[in-house]
Image (cartoon, rainbow, N blue to C red):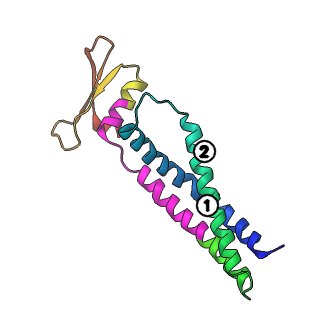
Amino acid sequence: MKKRYLYALLFAIPGFFISLPVAREIFVVFLDVYETYISPQVQFRETAVLILIFLTAWAALIAIGYLVGMKIENGPASNWIAILISGGLTLLFLVFLLRWSVDYAAERSNLTLCSEYCQRNGFSGSVAPPSDASEQTCRCFNFSNDESLSVPLEDLK
């Protein structure tokens, strides 16, 4: 077996995990461009587009591994280089994943906290002030748009 196939395999493993968040981010940009410039009447299957973007990104990383393997196939230390490159890509993915999870674990906005609380308690609507407002109260409304509940945002955090 030629070493270029080994390189393709070694790039495929971390490439799978790297392609997941990359495809998600590209998909978000695609949706933004789609909603801004393309007619919203044209329907498409979002899941199919997301899977297509993921498979394209993964295939690109496998192709890069194959090309790198072809370039350094005859070198004496090529086995170690492949393992180091694959390990480096996996480490890069783990750092990216850690950073991504820290961003998503950040404090949620007042509007999000208030909305989730009111929905959990069966109300139809909610209002929350901006985070820099002096009054920090979440208001929940019933189906007739009467204020039914007022809760300090500190209690929701």
Q: Along the polypeptide, which appears first: circle 1 or circle 2?
A: 2
From the viewer's perspective, tell me whether residue 129 is left or right of residue 49: left
Q: Quadrant of the N terminus?
A: bottom right
Q: Magenta span: helix, strand or loop, mainly? A: helix
Dot 2 alpha-carbon crowd within 10 angstroms: few under 14, some 14 to 19, many 20 or more: some
Q: Amino acid at mark 2?
A: Ile
Identified at 40% across, 37% down, the residue is 38
Res 149 quadrant in image: top left
Mark 2 sits on what residue?
A: 51
Identified at 58% across, 68% down, the residue is 91
Q: CA distance from mark 1 to mark 2?
A: 14 Å
Which range is magenta? 89-115
From the viewer's perspective, tell me whether residue 118 is left or right of residue 82: left
In the displayed structure, would residue 144 be above or below residue 115? above
Q: Residue furthest right?
A: 1
Residue 132 x, y percent position in the rendering: 19, 44
Residue 86 on the magenta span: no
In the displayed structure, would residue 21 be above or below residue 110? below
Residue 19 visible: yes
Identified at 77% across, 75% down, the residue is 3
Q: Residue furthest left?
A: 134
Q: Nearer the viewer, residue 139 or 37?
A: 37
